[in-house]
Image (cartoon, rainbow, N blue to C red):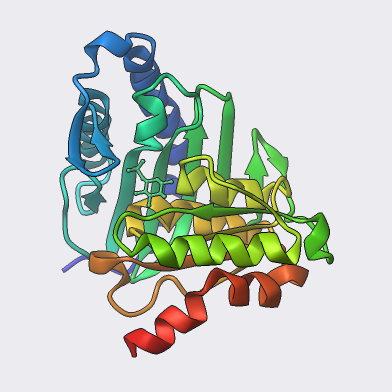
């Protein structure tokens, strides 16, 4: 049994998190610079893993075991279970980009206490960008506060729609078509975590994906919330083991993007 988490416990983790993300980012960058060494393998259609993903997650596990031995880790590559002090890592989100030399990828670290996200860092070393958030403390990009966009008109909006191989492609294409018909500019850059930070930074007005896993969004959703974006209740039901749909939008565009995404319909059918 672990003792209840105090403010000091959280502060210690917050302080450690930025440095840890940078260390992991440096390791990932060494692999990124040497594409021939990646030994890219597939876990399924359009689902890649490289030596770098494994090495970054292994180093993180080593560092957490040494600094916070009572904490648990859940990671994309090595799994893990829930606990009341849980780190969630995606060692490289955007692996498909990473493995092709595209700079849109990041290291994602989230800390969840008693099922509630408390801390998040997204570090994108190839873009030289670090997003940080602490619950109730706002969100920053490279140390400067960020805010979600105040866009009100969908015909002026940029919306990213993530594609998951875990659901029928038609559901995705229908959502994309609805967004275009409304007049939005739709894009997909290949990293769910970074896409959420773009909403947080006001560079895009929404990110939707019909199914995504906890490690892709545990850190970035907190960053989006803390920047004033509206987000769905991803952390509900069996989110940790099975994932959920995800949505984050500029506050005034919530209703229109939610409906266009097809998420309400999907949830109605599932219940
Ligand atoms: C993937 C990316 C992608 C999203 C997928 C994720 P990975 O994560 O975030 O943008 O559409 O659902 O699985 O495999 O690059 O860590």
Q: Position of residue 135 (x, y in %)?
A: 55, 61
Taking 60 as reference, is 265 above or below it?
A: below
Front residue (pair 114, 106): 106
- In the displayed structure, does residue 83 sit left or right of residue 188? left
Front residue (pair 115, 10): 115
Which residue is pictured at 54% across the width and 66% down the height? 175
Which residue is pictured at 46% across the width and 62% down the height? 172
Which residue is pictured at 24% across the width and 47% down the height? 75
Q: Position of residue 225 (x, y in %)?
A: 60, 63
Look at the image and tell me in which quarter the C terminus lies: bottom left
- In the displayed structure, does residue 17 sit left or right of residue 155? left
Taking 97 as reference, is 162 above or below it?
A: below
Q: Position of residue 239 (x, y in %)?
A: 32, 70
For the image, the number of numbered tags is 0
Q: Position of residue 118 (x, y in %)?
A: 46, 60
- In the displayed structure, does residue 235 sit left or right of residue 55? right
Taking 170 as reference, is 133 above or below it?
A: above
Which residue is pictured at 52% across the width and 66% down the height? 174
The quadrant in which residue 141 appears is top right
Front residue (pair 269, 52): 269
Look at the image and tell me in which quarter the N terminus lies: bottom left
- Whether residue 223 is visible here, answered yes or no, is yes
- In the displayed structure, does residue 149 sit left or right of residue 92? right
The quadrant in which residue 237 appears is bottom left
- Whether residue 134 is visible here, answered yes or no, is no
């Amino acid at each position: 049994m672990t003792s209840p988490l105090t403010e000091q416990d959280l502060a210690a983790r917050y302080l450690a998190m930025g440095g840890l993300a940078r260390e992991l980012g440096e390791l990932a960058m060494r692999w990124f610079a040497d594409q021939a060494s990646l030994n890219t393998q597939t876990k399924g259609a359009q689902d890649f893993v490289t030596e770098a993903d494994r090495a970054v997650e292994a180093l993180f596990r080593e560092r957490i075991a040494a600094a916070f031995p009572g904490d648990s880790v859940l990671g994309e590559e090595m799994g893990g279970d829930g606990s009341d002090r849980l780190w969630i890592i995606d060692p490289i989100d955007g692996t498909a980009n990473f493995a092709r030399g595209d700079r849109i990828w990041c290291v994602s670290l989230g800390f969840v206490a008693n099922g509630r996200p408390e801390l998040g860092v997204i570090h994108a070393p190839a873009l030289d960008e670090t997003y940080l958030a602490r619950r109730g403390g706002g969100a920053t990009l490279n140390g400067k506060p960020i805010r979600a966009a105040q866009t009100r008109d969908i015909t002026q909006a940029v919306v990213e729609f993530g594609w998951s191989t875990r659901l029928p492609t038609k559901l995705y294409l229908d959502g994309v078509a609805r967004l275009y018909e409304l007049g939005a500019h739709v894009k997909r850059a290949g990293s769910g975590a970074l896409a959420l930070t773009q909403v947080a930074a006001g560079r895009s007005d929404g990110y939707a994906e019909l199914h995504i896993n906890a490690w892709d969004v545990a850190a970035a959703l907190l960053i989006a919330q803390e920047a004033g974006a509206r987000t769905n209740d991803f952390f509900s039901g069996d989110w940790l083991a099975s994932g959920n749909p995800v949505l984050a939008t500029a506050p005034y565009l919530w209703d229109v993007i939610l409906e266009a995404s097809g998420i309400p319909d999907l949830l109605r059918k599932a219940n």
